[in-house]
């Protein structure tokens, strides 16, 4: 299978797409064609890794990693991803719990997969591969944990100063010497712009051998599609109904993974995107005009994105706004709505939800009644609420227990460098840390 840029650059192999992260013309890699599946193809797949093997084999057909696919998936799915039925009188709903990994966020799936792939491809290279990752909260921690102290790998994490929770900030800054954590004076979009600028700088890219672990890397999307495949197949097998999904999203990576799974024929019904007060996506669906804008700081900080990169891929896979809004729904959720949803979730379900997951529970409750009652729904839970204790605990009136993995991370010493949101500042930090 070949991979092409959303901007037209010629085909690349999967290995090349994984290592490069972004195409030479600045576009994002996608498979030249998506394979299609019937539910029967997965009849012998009893576990999520087995479902993932069936789904991903076509993508690895021409890759040097093909013999290692089972081992890669074993590293990726070293933690459970349960689907929990929700006690509700408003229809059928379940929670897809993606927060049981090493850093208690859904980003662990893609980060572990990408680390397993790139270490096999580049771990013995003469010079290290430098992974650039812009983060609005959880991505950087997951990537740093996955690549921490791996041979031949360096990680540079860029995160916006003052726009992540204290616990998120700690997990971005507590790793080994191969991880450089940069606290950027700006918003997530500034961090993302710095990553894209650096990867487009030929001289800098040649010196440091850049790749990316943001969802601009196809290696993040492929494994994320597998948990949508697995959850939908299990629901379809037990009920005969295609479940709908409500997906919290900021940069559109997790949402695109769900869309890709449906495009490949998996038994998935309606897909509704939950965004926060950053309305770039919802306004696009309403006005048919794509107008990126500076991101706003919200309680759902990992979704604070004003210019989502993966819209470029989404349009390529599905179509422009006039087509997208026929195939997807989107609801923008304010901070007040998030707070109300966290309170109601605790009262109704008996457990706490994080601000990002609360955008999904609010969105599900806000669906048109015929749509909500006419389908079984799986709501995507993206992070553990204990990562946002200063928001969640006052709303529910209880102290949240720390997951063991998160407690271990918070016990580590942290360090970071402060930089301005300029390409020169990033280049200087790289030189001082990795060269001097």
Image (cartoon, rainbow, N blue to C red):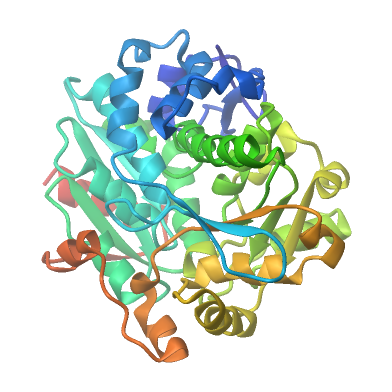
| Between 309 and 208, the one nearer to me in the picture | 309
Residue 230 visible? The answer is yes
Residue at position x 11%, y 47% from top? 436
Asked which quadrant contains residue 416, the reply is bottom left
Q: Residue furthest top?
A: 62
| Between 291 and 230, the one nearer to me in the picture | 230
Q: Quadrant of the N terminus?
A: top right
Horizontal and vertical percent position of residue 18: 42, 26
Q: Is residue 60 left or right of residue 387?
A: right
Above or below, 281 relative to 234: below
Above or below, 19 relative to 185: above
Residue at position x 74%, y 39% from top? 315
Residue at position x 20%, y 20% from top? 125
Residue at position x 31%, y 26% from top? 72
How many dots with numbers? 0
| Between 8 and 102, the one nearer to me in the picture | 102
Asked which quadrant contains residue 373, the reply is bottom right
Above or below, 82 relative to 362: above
Residue 427 visible? The answer is no
Q: Is residue 307 left or right of residue 188?
A: right
Q: Is residue 32 left or right of residue 63?
A: right
Q: Residue furthest front?
A: 238
Horizontal and vertical percent position of residue 171: 26, 62
Horizontal and vertical percent position of residue 360: 61, 64
Asked which quadrant contains residue 269, the reply is top right
């Amino acid at each position: 299978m070949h991979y092409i840029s959303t901007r037209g650059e010629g085909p690349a192999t999967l290995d090349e797409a994984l290592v490069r992260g972004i195409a030479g013309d600045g576009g994002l890699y996608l498979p030249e064609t998506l394979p299609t599946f019937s539910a029967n193809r997965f009849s012998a797949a009893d576990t999520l890794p087995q479902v993932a093997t069936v789904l991903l084999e076509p993508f690895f057909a021409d890759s040097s990693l093909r013999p290692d696919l089972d081992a890669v998936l074993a590293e990726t799915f070293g933690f459970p991803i349960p689907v929990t039925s929700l006690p509700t009188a408003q229809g059928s709903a379940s929670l897809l719990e993606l927060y049981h990994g090493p850093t208690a966020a859904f980003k662990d799936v893609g980060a572990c997969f990408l680390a397993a792939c790139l270490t096999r491809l580049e771990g013995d290279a003469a010079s290290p591969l430098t992974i650039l990752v812009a983060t609005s909260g959880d991505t950087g921690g997951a990537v740093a944990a996955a690549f921490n102290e791996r041979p031949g790998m360096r990680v540079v994490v860029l995160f916006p100063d003052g726009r992540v929770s204290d616990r998120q900030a700690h997990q971005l800054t507590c790793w080994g010497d191969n991880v450089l954590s940069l606290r950027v004076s700006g918003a997530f979009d500034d961090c993302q712009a710095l990553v894209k600028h650096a990867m487009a700088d030929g001289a800098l890219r040649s010196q440091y051998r850049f790749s990316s672990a943001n969802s601009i890397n196809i290696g993040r999307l492929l494994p994320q599609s597998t948990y949508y495949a697995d959850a939908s197949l299990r629901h379809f097998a037990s009920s005969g109904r295609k479940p709908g999904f409500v997906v919290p999203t900021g940069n559109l990576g997790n949402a695109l993974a769900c869309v890709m799974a449906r495009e490949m024929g998996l038994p998935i019904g309606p897909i509704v995107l939950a965004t926060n007060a950053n309305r770039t996506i919802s306004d696009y669906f309403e006005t048919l005009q794509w107008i990126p804008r500076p991101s706003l700081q919200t309680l759902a900080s990992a979704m604070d994105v004003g210019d989502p990169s993966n819209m470029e891929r989404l349009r390529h896979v599905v179509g422009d706004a006039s087509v997208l809004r026929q195939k997807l729904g989107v609801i923008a959720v304010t901070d007040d709505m998030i707070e109300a949803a966290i309170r109601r979730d605790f009262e109704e379900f008996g457990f706490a939800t994080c601000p990002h997951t609360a955008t999904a529970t609010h969105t599900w409750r806000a669906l048109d009644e015929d749509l909500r009652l006419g389908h079984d729904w799986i709501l995507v839970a993206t992070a553990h609420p204990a990562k946002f204790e200063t928001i969640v605990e006052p709303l529910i009136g209880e102290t949240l227990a720390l997951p063991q993995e998160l407690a271990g991370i918070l016990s580590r010493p942290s360090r970071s460098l402060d930089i301005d949101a300029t390409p020169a500042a990033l280049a200087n930090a790289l030189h001082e840390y990795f060269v001097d």
